[in-house]
Image (cartoon, helix red, strand yellow):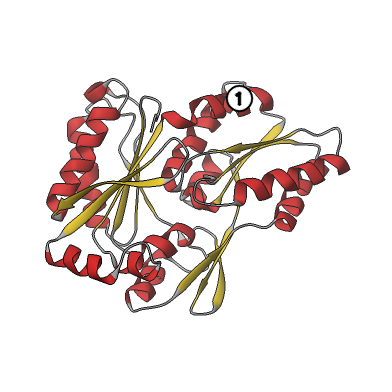
Amino acid sequence: MADYVLSGCSAADLSREHFERICVRYICFHYMMDGVSYPDDLGQTLPADEFYARMARGAMTKTSQINISEYVDYFSAFCEQGLDIVHVTLSSGISGTYNSACNAAAIVRENYPNREIFVVDSLGASSGYGLLLDTAAAMRDRGLSARELARWITENRLKLHHWFFSTDLTSYVRGGRISKTAAFFGGVFEICPLLNMDYLGRLIPRKKIRTKKNVIREIVRAMVENADNGTDYDGKCFISMSACREDAEEVARLVEEAFPKLNGKVLINNIGGLIGAHTGPGTVALFFWGGERMD
């Protein structure tokens, strides 16, 4: 058993059972819905179905990052138990939580000078961040020290590919990411934007594809082009989705058909409250290991 804690946050969009099974601890983000604060606690307080149903009815959402004080309390609790920490954060390309965690770690190290705290930027999000944690847990179980694991995550995080598409642009309009006019024409012409995450951990629009059927095929094609060993890929594949399980299941079916050597079935998770507050319903994200992200 490792003498340190491997930790992440709720935005990794794994189930509570999954976190427990791989022995990874997590700290929760928060979000507001119609003025009420909720913890982003993997659907325990507000189940995903209800969360997205409220959004579809027009509920307004706002998110907040984990603050330094919360991180100080979180890290201190492990240090009091005599444990070192490897904490992996949500991408700095979409959140300031990495800086908060680094500042908190500096404070805690002063109080616990004999403890080591490694804070690593995942440069990932949702279940891609989750797949990074899942793989890191396997490396921990092979006997890597805390320092070795932090180095391994840093050296391999850009090999985790993140591809997303959305069939509902309502939340993009509310968040100011696209105009009402663009959303109107996108709806008329059935435009589904395809995005991925770049080497700085930012979400970048790559293509505008007409019809859901075509964008589903395109996201699987992106995996064929980028996965380790092409269609001989034998790693894990995770999907996360926001209230569009049929779309996610169709992507999973096509992936399993195209990649017969996959390590197990494609795992489908819910997009949690933190990221879902920005995407709204209708988003499917696909995650797998491949060559290093260069752009």
Callout 1: few (<14), some (14-19), or many (20+) C-alpha neighbours within 10 Å? some
In the shown orientation, is residue 191 left or right of residue 147? left
In the shown orientation, is residue 127 left or right of residue 65? left
Note whether residue 26 is visible.
no
Question: In the displayed structure, would residue 275 be above or below residue 77?
Answer: below
State how many labels appear.
1
In the shown orientation, is residue 205 left or right of residue 63? left
Residue 140 quadrant = top right
**190 and 224: which one is in front?**
190
Q: In the image, residue 181 lies at what x, y percent?
A: 23, 70
In the shown orientation, is residue 284 left or right of residue 122? left
- Quadrant containing the N terminus in the rendered view: top right
Q: In the image, residue 49 lies at what x, y percent?
A: 37, 67
Note whether residue 136 is visible.
yes
- Local secondary structure at mark 1: helix
Residue 263 quadrant = top left
Amino acid marked by disc 1 = Arg
> What residue do we see at 55% from left, 29% from top?
153
Q: In the image, residue 18 lies at what x, y percent?
A: 48, 45
**51 and 138: which one is in front?**
51
Question: In the displayed structure, would residue 123 be above or below residue 95?
Answer: above
- Quadrant containing the C terminus in the rendered view: top left
> What residue do we see at 62% from left, 22% from top?
144
Q: For mark 1, what is the residue?
A: 151
Q: In the image, residue 48 lies at what x, y percent?
A: 41, 64
> What residue do we see at 37% from left, 68% from top?
52
